[in-house]
Image (spheres, rainbow, N blue to C red):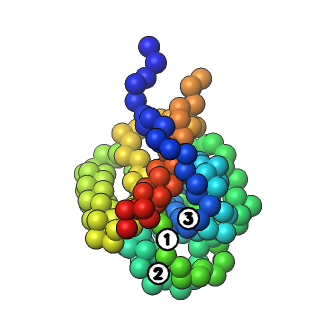
Amino acid sequence: MSSIKGPAPAPESLDGSPLRIAIVHARWNHTVINALVAGAVAKLRAHGVKDSNIVVESVPGSFELPLACQKVIAGSHVQAGATATDLLGGLSFTSGTPRSGTPVPAGTVNMPKEPFDAVIAIGVLIKGSTMHFEYICDSVSHALMRIQLDTGVPVIFGVLTALTDDQALERAGLGRGEDKGHNHGEDWGAAAVEMATHTRRWS
Ligand code: DLZ
């Protein structure tokens, strides 16, 4: 039987061409992260968001995502961030072991301080043998929700909270079985365009 899960299509076709979107991602579990970021960028582009308006920042781990999102929204960081063009030119999105510590390279493009219409926070938490996972999942999800409510800028919850490596791989379209799964980064890109569009209209 086919799955009933997942979002229905948006009720209207969305034009991302006026939007400016930030992706803030953790570097832990970078193989999965890279695929999710690539999926999000591909969907933003498919909705017409310009490469020059997609800015990508990275932080060490998921615990760092809330502060980074808050600062990106506030526009208080001076530099760094790669545009989609830099990112896709500089990275190879290949499958492999999800827990290697190799950092994702950061870009070197100067960022104009224009407001973002939405931020996508991407992290991959994989449960280990201690309570670390529970504490980070709980605090990060609550903090990201608080940031979007406090700032009025949509923060898309792109944090996978996986119980196993395979769960994480499958949710990035990198499953090791015949079924590769689905890349949730694509859904997050679409959600960012939809929420940014709604928020502009509602403001
Ligand atoms: C320390 C840690 C562990 C054990 N696991 C993960 C993980 O699965 N995913 C992730 O994004 N980050 C992990 N981290 C790093 C923390 O998020 C954080 O970067 C450090 O505790 C430093 O604050």
Give the amino acid at mark 2: Gly
Residue bearing mark 2: 75
Q: Callout 1 environment at 10 Å: few (<14), some (14 to 19), or many (20+)? A: many
Q: Callout 2 environment at 10 Å: few (<14), some (14 to 19), or many (20+)? A: some
- Residue at the image position 63 percent from the left and 42 percent from the top: 95
The answer to which of 135 and 20 lies nearer the viewer is 20
Residue bearing mark 3: 19
Quarter holding residue 198: bottom left
| Eye-nearest disc, 1 or 2 | 1
Percent coordinates x, y for residue 146 in the rendering: 27, 65
- Residue at the image position 48 percent from the left and 67 percent from the top: 117
- Residue at the image position 49 percent from the left and 71 percent from the top: 116
Q: CA distance from mark 2 to mark 3?
A: 16 Å
- Residue at the image position 41 percent from the left and 47 percent from the top: 160
Which of the numbered marks, if any, corresponds to residue 143? none
Q: CA distance from mark 1 to mark 3?
A: 8 Å
Q: Callout 3 environment at 10 Å: few (<14), some (14 to 19), or many (20+)? A: many
Secondary structure of residue under mark 3: loop
Residue bearing mark 1: 116
The answer to which of 4 and 165 lies nearer the viewer is 4
Give the farthest residue toward the top: 1
Q: Is residue 121 shown to the viewer in this render? A: no
Percent coordinates x, y for residue 45 in the rendering: 65, 54
